């Protein structure tokens, strides 16, 4: 504001100092009270007339100032017009930036979808066979109504018993399968935790490299589902299999892809990524320090009609037990 005032003052000063040479009429000089004597300013050795001849007399200093202000107003209008052009240019830049951001966002999700598809498509015949055997065990458990061993519930309602039943079914058809529990300590980035899954060891055809470790996760897709997630992330999660069967290297790549997408999703939504959704935490579930759980064989009986939970019978309250009895006269 002060800079603009100073600039206007300097322009006015320059305008007033601009020499204007006009032919003066012959004769005696005009008196001051009639036409206004021309004010003369000594500048160096020159005498410069500050008056401007107009009409039948000289323009006063106030008229000169008003003339300058009118010229300045037109120049200001042009400057405002230029400023409006600058605003339009900046608005165009913002729109271009939004379009560029949308294009980058679309390219990211397309690349993540492609990477996930490539990672999941790399599957061996042994993995395909083991996946089918695992699905058969799950269908058998759900169809026959296998009873949970830790309580009188259905095994499909208890994760640990469901995994134990699947591992038992795989052992009965010749697989070296067992429950596996991973544990990790708390760190500045993630909290401590533990996770149980199925671990299968398979011998290679040559037998020189040792057994190959395969991981079975019954609810793999559900492990990555998030509330308040974007459509792009949900579409990516829906590409995951419900039951995962594969090597540790394959699982590591899939976890990295989905966790990067989860981070991007939360960043776009301007939300904080929960510690248990971070890549390090998710990787610790299946690829951290773990141990096989070797225990006695568990018995999983089939549920009968008597085993099904019946709704509890209503009981009469003892507080109202004697209220409806007839009064008997004792003789």
Image (tube, helix red, strand yellow):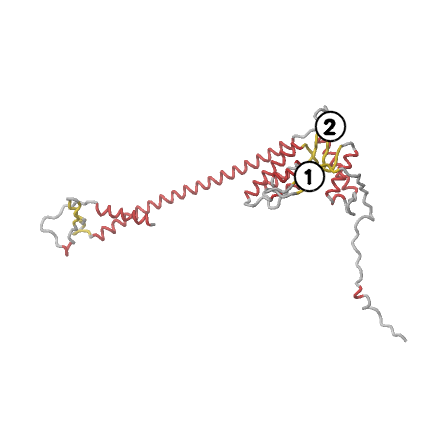
Residue located farthest toward the right when viewing the structure as drawn: 331
Query: Image point 31% across, 49% down: which residue?
Result: 5
The answer to whether mark 1 and mark 2 are in CB contact below 8 A is: no
Pinpoint residue 213: horizontal percent, then vertical percent: 70, 31
Task: Please tell me which residue lies in front, 89 or 16.
Answer: 16
Instruction: Tell me the tag on residue 56.
Output: none
Count the marks: how many?
2
Task: Please tell me which residue lies in front, 118 or 55.
Answer: 118
Residue 9 placement, left or right of 269: left
Secondary structure beneath label 2: loop
- Distance, label 1 to label 2, CA atoms, is 23 Å
Which residue carries the number 1 mark? Answer: 182
Q: Decide: is 224 above or below 327.
A: above
Pinpoint residue 287: horizontal percent, then vertical percent: 66, 36
- Of tags 1 and 2, the one toward the viewer is 1
Instruction: Say which quarter of the image contains residue 158.
Output: top right
Which residue carries the number 2 mark? Answer: 203
Query: Image point 60% across, 33% down: which residue?
Result: 115
Residue located farthest toward the bottom when viewing the structure as drawn: 331
Decide: few, some or many residues near mark 2? Use Cα within 10 Å; few <14, some 14-19, many ≥20: few
């Amino acid at each position: 504001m002060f800079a603009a005032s100073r600039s206007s003052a300097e322009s006015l000063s320059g305008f007033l100092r601009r020499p204007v040479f006009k032919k003066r009429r012959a004769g005696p000089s005009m008196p001051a009270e009639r036409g206004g004597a021309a004010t003369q300013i000594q500048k160096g050795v020159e005498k410069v007339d500050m008056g401007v001849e107009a009409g039948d007399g000289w323009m006063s200093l106030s008229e000169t100032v008003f003339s300058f202000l009118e010229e300045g107003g037109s120049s200001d209008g042009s400057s405002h017009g230029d400023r409006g052009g600058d605003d339009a240019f900046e608005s165009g830049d913002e729109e271009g930036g939004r379009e560029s951001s949308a294009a980058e966002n679309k390219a990211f999700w397309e690349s993540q979808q492609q990477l996930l598809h490539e990672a999941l498509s790399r599957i061996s015949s042994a993995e395909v066979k083991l996946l089918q055997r695992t699905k058969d065990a799950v269908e058998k458990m759900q169809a026959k109504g296998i009873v949970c061993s830790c309580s009188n519930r259905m095994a499909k309602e208890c994760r640990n018993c469901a995994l134990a039943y699947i591992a038992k079914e795989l052992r009965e058809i010749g697989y070296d399968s067992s429950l596996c529990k991973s544990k990790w300590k708390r760190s500045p980035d993630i909290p401590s935790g533990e996770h149980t899954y199925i671990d299968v060891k398979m011998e290679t055809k040559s037998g020189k490299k040792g057994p190959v470790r395969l991981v079975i996760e019954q609810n793999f897709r559900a492990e990555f589902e998030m509330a308040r997630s974007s459509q792009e992330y949900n579409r990516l999660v829906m590409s995951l299999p419900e039951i995962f069967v594969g090597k540790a290297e394959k699982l590591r790549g899939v976890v990295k892809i989905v966790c990067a997408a989860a981070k991007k999703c939360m960043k776009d939504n301007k939300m904080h990524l929960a510690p248990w959704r971070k890549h390090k935490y998710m990787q610790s579930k299946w690829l951290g320090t773990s141990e096989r759980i070797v225990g006695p064989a568990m018995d999983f009986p089939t549920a009968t009609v008597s085993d099904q939970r019946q709704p509890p019978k209503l009981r009469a309250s003892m507080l109202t037990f004697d209220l409806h009895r007839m009064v008997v006269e004792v003789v």
